[in-house]
Image (cartoon, grey):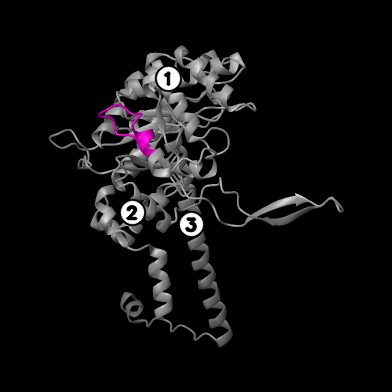
């Protein structure tokens, strides 16, 4: 019987009809699609779980992300920036990696903390190392609610984070990174409102304390504007001068005054310096927008740079005016409906990217001056990287002055793609 069973031939599969073959093909295709969707869903779920776990870890142990990168024998984590070169920097938000957070933005009910912000800052430092960027403006909200008068539970977070601040400061020094703050527009030192003045002084004290606890050199500063003009610029500057003696030594040492675009000109800021000794930061676009005294650009910048002490590299702010038509909504007076309208640009607005030819012309005009340059264009780090490429391409004689190396000379991906499209 076993031999008979072994000798029995397998049954031949019946040939499928064309209709059956088509149905089978459709079934397999659907099954393949279903499996692919299941894999995608599983991967997304896994990614969500990993993201949630990462977020939880950042809140519970934020400094676990702040390990010091490998250091050389001199204690540096990257090659030193040439002392003769001027730094280029950008403020706060990293546009090239939008997933990076600049500070703990949680509401007060969730107990935000400076340590969480410092954990985020370490991630930004890694991005800066990867792109060889040596100047960065930190968020002015690094220590959330630290000075809020009605929330004493947050008042101790800077002291609580002293060791963490020292560690992050050491990381910054190891990569040759110049850091600064630009306190918000709510910091007003010339106000007639005493409560606002006290709150402003407290905020400056908080940020100066953080810079000191980070053990940063004198080039790490806090930039403020004069404040409100209240219809009288002379009175506005006089009130600022009156507040100056109330500031602590650490605040006075770190504080820098900037000309603005609608209220206080470069001449106003220089007059405040003459009465207080405060250092000054020159803003290129603001000077174009508000210069009623008609002061010449380069000479005025030179006067600003001389307000800094010997041995401390000054800095300035640079941006180009936004030129695009603005699309806005306006209510039609006849119909009461909102309509899209096109409006001309406002020259106080910052461009996304700096015009390379305007920028290069200006940088050529200040080659005899030493100043780092904070770029305030809306594209931030992307604008900085693009400007380095522009310097290498259109002004190679300036490239070395700003530490631009051969690797920065590559053309933008968009430009290469356009050329390929034309050739095709």
Q: Is residue 142 visible?
A: no
Q: Residue at x 41, y 38 (%)?
A: 300
Q: CA gap, disc 3 to disc 2?
A: 40 Å
Numbered tag placed on residue 192 in the rendering: none
Vertical position of residue 352 compared to residue 258: above or below: below
Quadrant of the image containing the N terminus: bottom left
Q: Does dot 2 land on a helix, a strand or a loop?
A: helix
In this rendered view, identify the residue nearer to me: 114 or 392.
Answer: 392
Q: Name the residue tied to disc 3.
A: 40
From the viewer's perspective, is 117 left or right of 338?
A: left
Check disc 1 and report the residue beneath it: 276
Q: Position of residue 120 (x, y in %)?
A: 40, 35
> How far apart, in angstroms, are the residues tagged by discs 3 and 1?
64 Å
Mark nearer the viewer, 3 or 2: 2
Q: Between residue 411 and residue 14, name the one nearer to us.
A: 411
Magenta residues (range): 301-315
* Residues at circles 3 and 2 in contact by the CB criterion of under 8 Å: no
Place residue 235 in its image quadrant: top right
Q: Residue at x 50, y 41 (%)?
A: 294
Residue drawn where x is 48% and y is 62% of the image: 36
Measure the C-alpha gap from mark 2 to mark 1: 37 Å
134 with respect to 338 (left or right): left
**The C terminus lies in which quarter of the figure?**
bottom left
- Which residue is the site of mark 2? 388
């Amino acid at each position: 019987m076993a031999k008979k069973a072994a000798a029995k031939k397998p049954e031949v599969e019946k040939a499928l009809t064309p209709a059956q073959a088509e149905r089978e093909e459709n079934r397999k295709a659907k099954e393949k699609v279903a499996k692919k969707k299941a894999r995608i869903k599983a991967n997304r779920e896994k990614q969500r779980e990993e993201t949630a776990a990462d977020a939880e870890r950042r809140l519970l142990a934020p400094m676990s992300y702040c390990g010091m990168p490998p250091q050389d024998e001199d204690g540096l984590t990257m090659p030193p920036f040439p002392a003769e070169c001027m730094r280029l920097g950008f403020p706060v938000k990293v546009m090239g990696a939008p997933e990076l957070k600049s500070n703990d933005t949680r509401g007060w009910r969730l107990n935000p903390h400076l340590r969480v912000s410092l954990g985020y800052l370490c991630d930004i430092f890694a991005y800066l190392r990867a792109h060889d960027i040596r100047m960065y403006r930190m968020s002015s909200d690094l220590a959330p609610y630290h000075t809020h008068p009605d929330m004493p539970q947050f008042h101790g977070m800077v002291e609580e984070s002293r060791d963490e601040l020292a560690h992050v400061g050491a990381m910054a020094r190891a990569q040759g990174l110049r850091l600064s703050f630009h306190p918000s527009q709510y910091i007003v030192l010339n106000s007639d409102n005493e409560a606002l003045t006290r709150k402003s002084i407290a905020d400056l004290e908080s940020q100066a304390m953080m810079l000191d606890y980070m053990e940063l050199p004198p080039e790490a500063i806090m930039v403020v504007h004069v404040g409100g003009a209240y219809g009288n610029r002379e009175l506005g500057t006089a009130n600022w001068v009156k507040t100056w003696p109330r500031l602590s030594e650490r605040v006075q040492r770190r504080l820098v005054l900037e000309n603005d675009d609608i209220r206080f000109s470069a001449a106003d800021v220089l007059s405040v310096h003459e009465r207080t000794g405060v250092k000054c930061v020159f803003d290129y676009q603001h000077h174009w927008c508000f210069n009623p005294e008609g002061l010449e650009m380069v000479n005025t910048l030179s006067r600003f740079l001389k307000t800094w002490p010997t041995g401390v590299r000054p800095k300035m702010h640079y941006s180009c005016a936004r030129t695009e038509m603005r699309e806005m909504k306006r209510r039609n007076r006849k119909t009461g409906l909102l309509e899209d309208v096109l409006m001309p640009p406002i020259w106080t607005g910052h461009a996304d990217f700096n015009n390379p030819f305007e920028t290069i012309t200006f940088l050529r005009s200040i080659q005899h001056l030493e100043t780092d340059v904070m770029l305030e264009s809306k594209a931030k780090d992307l604008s900085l990287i693009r400007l380095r490429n522009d310097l290498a391409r259109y002004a190679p004689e300036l490239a070395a002055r700003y530490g631009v190396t051969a690797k920065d000379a590559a053309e933008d991906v968009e430009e290469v793609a356009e050329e390929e499209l034309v050739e095709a």
